[in-house]
């Protein structure tokens, strides 16, 4: 906890940055992950994401390198194209954390994914044109959707609109 005047906020002490990856396969599918999050005591639908600089000896890890690592660890996918879409505040009233969003395109599977030994990740591969309705269905079923998913979908439309048939 950090205090500046009367303002109190949280600062992450085990990493220097956070990355999140908007993942689009060669077949125009989006990759979402689902995992249990103790702070909200339930599973959350998210985009692949992770910490940067949290591995001993890799404290100065490059953001893109970390994003590629997390993408493969969590989903088993690699990307032919990677683009940095910028840094965004996650909860500016409560913490100093920001997230850098990446667009990973032309992704292909080379591993099983599922996360490291501390994670139990479920991978969802959804056709891009069905993603919004799939997410709405998940929400109606009681799933919590990470707000970065919505930001990611909006950025995807701005930077890589779907092909017009």
Image (cartoon, rainbow, N blue to C red):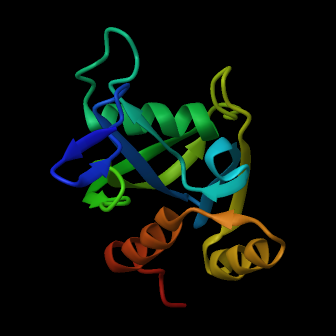
Of all residues shown, which one is farthest toward the bottom? Answer: 165
Q: Residue at x 37, y 10 (%)?
A: 56
**Residue 124 versus residue 61 in the image, above or below:** below
Q: Residue at x 59, y 56 (%)?
A: 46
Position of 68 with respect to 113 (left or right) is left
Position of 121 with respect to 28 (left or right) is right
**Residue 66 versus residue 83 in the image, above or below:** above
Q: Position of residue 94 (x, y in %)?
A: 36, 56
Pick the residue in front: 29 or 132: 132
Position of 149 with respect to 109 (left or right) is left
Q: Residue at x 32, y 25 (%)?
A: 53
Pick the residue in front: 48 or 108: 48
**Residue 136 versus residue 5 in the image, above or below:** below
Q: In which quadrant will I find the C terminus?
A: bottom right
Q: Position of residue 63 (x, y in %)?
A: 28, 37
Position of 107 with respect to 128 (left or right) is left
**Residue 54 versus residue 133 in the image, above or below:** above
Q: In which quadrant will I find the N terminus?
A: top left
Q: Position of residue 79 (x, y in %)?
A: 45, 45
Q: Quadrant of residue 111?
A: top right
Q: Residue at x 56, y 62 (%)?
A: 146
Q: Quadrant of residue 59?
A: top left
Of all residues shown, which one is farthest toward the right? Answer: 141
Q: How many marks?
A: 0
Q: Quadrant of residue 27?
A: bottom right
């Amino acid at each position: 906890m950090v205090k500046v005047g009367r303002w109190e906020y949280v600062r992450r002490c085990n990493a220097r940055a956070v990355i999140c990856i908007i993942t689009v396969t060669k077949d125009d599918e989006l990759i979402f992950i689902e995992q249990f999050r103790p702070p909200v005591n339930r599973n959350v639908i998210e985009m692949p994401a992770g910490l940067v600089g949290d591995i001993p000896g890799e404290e100065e890890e490059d953001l893109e390198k970390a994003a590629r690592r997390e993408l493969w660890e969590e989903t088993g996918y690699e990307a032919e194209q990677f683009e940095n879409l910028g840094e965004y505040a996650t909860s500016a009233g409560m913490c100093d954390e920001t997230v850098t969003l990446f667009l990973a395109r032309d992704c292909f599977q080379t591993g099983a994914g599922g996360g490291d030994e501390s994670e139990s990740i479920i991978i969802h591969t959804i056709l891009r044109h069905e993603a919004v309705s799939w997410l709405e269905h998940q929400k109606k079923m009681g799933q919590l959707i990470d707000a970065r998913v919505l930001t990611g979908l909006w950025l995807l439309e701005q930077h890589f609109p779907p092909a017009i048939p």
